[in-house]
Amino acid sequence: MFCWLLAGGCMLWVIMRIGGLERGFPLVQLVAYTPYMLLLSLLALLVVVLCRRWLAAGFLLLAVIALALAVLPREIGGPEEVPGGQPVRVLALNLGVGHAHADQVVDLARARDIDLIAVQELTPKAAVELDRVGFGSDYPHRVLQPEAGATGGAIYSRWPLRDRGSLTAEFHQPVADIEVPASIPIQLVSVHPMAPTTPARTSQWAAEFGSLPEAYSANLPLVLAGDFNATLDHVNLRDLLDTGYRDAAEVTGEGLISTWPARLEPRLPVTLDRVLAEKGISFGQYDVEKIDGTDHRAVITELLLPPVADGN
């Protein structure tokens, strides 16, 4: 009976994940831990084999294969190359209700030669502090929507931009058209839907996630960067990708590097922060860095925009 409980539990998880059946609280929260379920299913398979329960072992083997096919492709890939392409380095960071150490954020942006920054949970105090330690001169073009608490957001740019307002949601999700030198312009969104922490907020999360712009829905190529409060195991995110986006971490083979929580907590770490770009935009280097004061890690992505033909 114990062996069949193991097999049945793993198969139910597979059906939920593969079928995209996680609806409502707490299934939305549980499916985020699918990579850990792959490890548990391997352990369960070993136990059942040692118990010589071969039929149950067969079902568990199917579960292991299905979970592996869902999870392991995130570790297959590498930086892409675009001859003559224009590199654009993007930083996405949730400031942890403005508590991220501003000097570390500025040092990281300078060390990585960052061009565009998508910020979440920007407070008025954090905005002033970031400008004081360097953003005021380094990133003169910006869309700032600071607020007390976790609802603020911003886009910082080295290059001229056009403020396109914000997506409709409880948290500010600024949108801007960016003029990229020697390449095509892009539209950048600083993403931050509601975290699905309660039954009511899970419903709100699903609604706000559905309001994120589909690929090719804007006049310019879209780049979404920030705290998605979703992993690649959530059907909402997979549906968004299916409209024509690619995920930087998955493309570069770094899709299992966690971004939250960045500090030691009883919760298992998962990957919530990411950068998506429409197909046609490639990804070079990808990295994740810890910043003191926030429970999210910073995501650094190099976009490779297609070269623009010389009109002369």
Image (cartoon, rainbow, N blue to C red):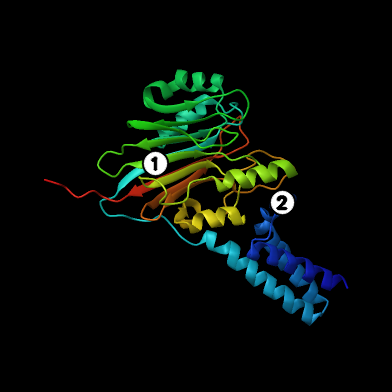
Closer to the camera in the image, 218 or 37: 218
Classify residue 108 as left or right of residue 86: right
At 78% across and 77% down in the image, what residue appears?
A: 56
Task: Give the label on residue 178, or none.
Answer: none
Residue at the extreme right of the image, as rendered? 1
* Residue 70, x across and y down, in percent: 59, 64
* Residue 123, x across and y down, in percent: 57, 24
Residue placed under numbered mark 2 in the picture? 24
* Residue 1, x across and y down, in percent: 88, 73
* Residue 178, x across and y down, in percent: 35, 37
At 31% across and 39% down in the image, what residue appears?
A: 180
Question: What residue type is disc 2 on?
Answer: Gly
Classify residue 183 as left or right of residue 220: left
Could you say which quadrant of the image residue 117 lies in? top left
Residue placed under numbered mark 1 in the picture? 187
C-alpha separation, residue under disc 1 versus residue under disc 2: 31 Å
Judge whether residue 133 can be spotted in this image: yes
Q: Secondary structure at mark 2?
A: loop
Classify residue 151 as left or right of residue 250: right
Closer to the camera in the image, 44 or 239: 239
Q: Secondary structure at mark 1?
A: strand
Are the residues flagged by discs 1 and 2 in contact, CB closer than 8 Å? Answer: no
